[in-house]
Amino acid sequence: MIKVQGLCKRYGGVTAVDDVSFEVAKGEIVGFLGPNGAGKSTTMKMLSCYLPPTSGKAEIAGFDVFKESLRAREHIGYMPENVPLPLDLRVVEYLRFRAALKGVPGRRVKERVADVCDLCGLLDVQRKLIGALSKGYRQRVGLADAMINEPDLLILDEPTIGLDPNQIRQVRELIKNLRRHHTILISTHILPEVEMTCSRVIIINKGRIEAMDTPENLRSRLSAGGEVRLEAKLADPKAATAKIKALEGVRGVSSHQVDGWTRFAIETDGDPRERVYNLTVEEKWAVRELSRRNATLEQVFTEITGEEG
């Protein structure tokens, strides 16, 4: 569905996107991640035919987005980070207007507006002025607009920005349901949402792609294998910390006291729980927790981009 080869964008002496190449297959939901200023939005604008590249090539559904822009746009639904909406129009009026602009046949406009209002949960507010809607509903209107012409590909730039946790969950479920009919490229800063929604992740940093894989594979490649949590009752926490640090596979240990128990957060390479357990038996520590947390996508993102959380 998407094929990008050597895509570059320069503004004077500044390179915003530097030799980016990737592919997205039909039916995938791919997360496009990176710090602010990494080149995410610039790349999405080029793929959406809103911005010409300095060099490189990109195809949508087999059409060159620069040489065959109009044909490529027929297959794209684009939702920008800040959706520009006319506040004095009703939801249904706006969607009918957008459907006509996007070439939806007149006999199908009413049907398509009803369909996207149903999919995006807008049926109860379709007669309301857009200016009277909450931020969450305005985001839904933007998503309905992107879907109105039944595109094969949805490009969503920060679709959950400014939403509360309940609204984020609703949009997440909507996006997951859309994969049955659409390929989706989604940019977001909410990394747990990416883990729950996306089948593959592309991480861009300083204009270049640094990693591209499934969330599971990216986590398994992280040098920090995860974190082991130990909660024990013992006489000398400082000495215990030193003994845990000496175990194979342990990269670092931090601890704090809670009601007479010491809680250890053990940074690991691999899974040293058996060695930690054997140490607790040998030292006769009373233990009420020994568990492992796998590396998160947030840790992967931080290590790859060098961004401190």
Image (spheres, rainbow, N blue to C red):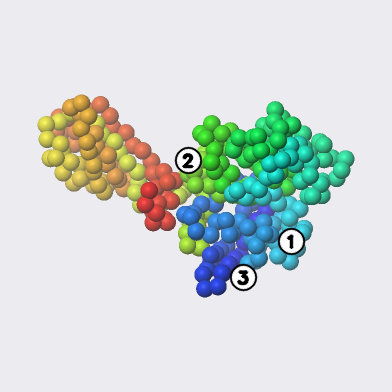
Q: Nearer the viewer, residue 205 or 5?
A: 205
Vertical arrangement, residue 188 with respect to residue 291, above or below: below
The residue under the point 12% across, 35% down is: 236
Check disc 2 and report the residue beneath it. 192
Tell me the tag on residue 69.
Answer: 1
Say which label, 1 or 3, has the lower sequence index.
3
Q: Nearer the viewer, mark 3 or mark 2?
A: 3
Query: What whole-number distance in Å separates the C-alpha atoms at marks 2 and 1?
Result: 34 Å
The residue under the point 22% across, 29% down is: 258
Q: Nearer the viewer, residue 188 or 127?
A: 127
The residue under the point 70% across, 61% down is: 65
> Can you give x and y, in whole percent of width and height, for residue 35 in the image?
47, 54
Image quadrant where residue 17 sits: bottom right
Amino acid type at mark 3: Thr
Amino acid type at mark 1: Ser
The residue under the point 25% across, 47% down is: 252
Query: What whole-number distance in Å separates the C-alpha atoms at marks 3 and 2?
Result: 34 Å
Image quadrant where residue 139 sits: top right
Check disc 3 and report the residue beneath it. 54
Q: Nearer the viewer, residue 266 or 149?
A: 149
